[in-house]
Amino acid sequence: MTTMSVCCVKGFKWEGTPEGRTEKIANGKYDAYVAGNNPDAAVLIIHDVYGWDNPNVRLMADHYARNTGATVYVPDFFLGDTLNRDKYPELSNQEFLGKYLMPFIGRHPRDVREKDIFAVTRALRREHGYEKLAAIGFCYGGWAIMRLGAKPEDQPEDEDKDAKPIEGPLVHAVSTAHPSLATEKDIDGVVVPLQILAPETDQMYTPALKQFTFDAAVRNKIPLDYLHFPGIEHGGLMRGDQKTVESRQALVRAQYAAVNFFKLHLDLIE
């Protein structure tokens, strides 16, 4: 059975007003928040359980676009379904987890959402014409970026039978902060440069999975950027408290580490 942790529920909303725009992408099938205007290089963000309209992920997209020069996409991979913690202030985090988060995840299992994630990613390369594409996933999105970074022959079959094959890897680099639902097989399958933004305390990305990541990267000769965030818990790099020094410093460190990772692998370093 798919499980999530109470740490996937907790968090803070950040201050600020998103500056991007909303568009229809992939032949108009998906809504997406978009920041930036680079026609050649893009970053795909795969959101956490709070979805594409969470102001935090939109502010993050603005930050990436502003500091990398890439176009950044946050598609709605939950297809209009939403999870709103604020609607149930009377519930403890544990109660919200059991009553709302777990049924929500049950409506969006990996095998169902993987098809949408690959459809969007392939559309960004083909229809939108991006020669260079990186992906980052937070919490729920963590398993997905690892699948995107796998060998083409290990990925889902392309549903567009008549489309021209995509040359080389589907994405050129993948990053994740506190991934959830990721397996050893997912980690071992990554064949492109990988970045891990890893809080010290994480019930979803356990010490055993962290060690497996190191071992797999060495065994498979995959470039690995691993950042350890002492004192930070799962979820803290997308929903951390901006008003505390330790949390704010971790957020800034994670944001700029991702920016530099994207710039390097999208050939955006001047």
Image (cartoon, helix red, strand yellow):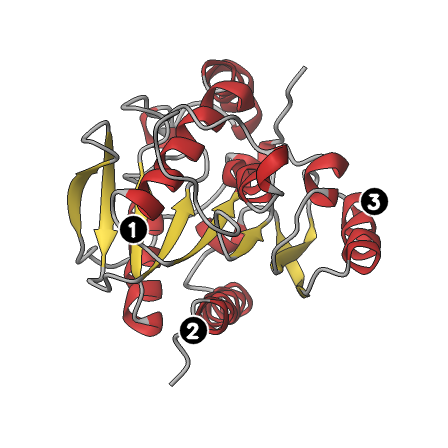
| Mark closer to the observer (3, 2) | 2
Look at the picture and state if 185 lies above or below 270. Answer: above
Task: Say which residue appears at 18% left-offset and 55% top-offset.
Answer: 20
* Mark nearer the N terminus (1 vs 2): 1
The answer to the question of whether label 1 and label 2 lie on touching residues, with beta carbons closer than 8 A, is: no
Task: Say which residue appears at 74% left-offset and 35% top-offset.
Answer: 185
Look at the picture and state if 142 lies above or below 113. Answer: below
**Amino acid type for the residue under numbered disc 2:** Asp
* Mark nearer the N terminus (3 vs 1): 1
Q: Answer with left or right where residue 170 lies relative to residue 23.
A: right
Task: Residue under label 3, please give it.
Answer: 208
The answer to the question of whether label 3 and label 1 lie on touching residues, with beta carbons closer than 8 A, is: no
Name the quadrant containing residue 119.
top left
**Amino acid type for the residue under numbered disc 3:** Ala
Please state which of residues 23 and 59 is positioned toward the viewer in this rendering: 23
Q: Which mark is residue 134?
A: none
Q: Which mark is residue 267?
A: 2
Q: Answer with left or right where residue 1 lies relative to residue 53.
A: right
Q: Answer with left or right where residue 249 lies relative to residue 208.
A: left
Percent across and percent down for residue 181 are: 63, 32
Percent across and percent down for residue 76 are: 31, 33
* Mark nearer the N terminus (3 vs 2): 3
Q: CA distance from mark 3 to mark 1?
A: 32 Å
**Amino acid type for the residue under numbered disc 1:** Arg
Please state which of residues 105 and 142 is positioned toward the viewer in this rendering: 142
Task: Say which residue appears at 43% left-offset and 40% top-offset.
Answer: 165
Task: Residue under label 1, please give it.
Answer: 58
Instruction: Answer whether residue 205 is visible to the viewer in this image.
Output: no
| Mark closer to the observer (1, 2) | 2
Tag 3 secondary structure: helix
Task: Say which residue appears at 39% left-offset and 30% top-offset.
Answer: 85
Q: CA distance from mark 1 to mark 2?
A: 24 Å
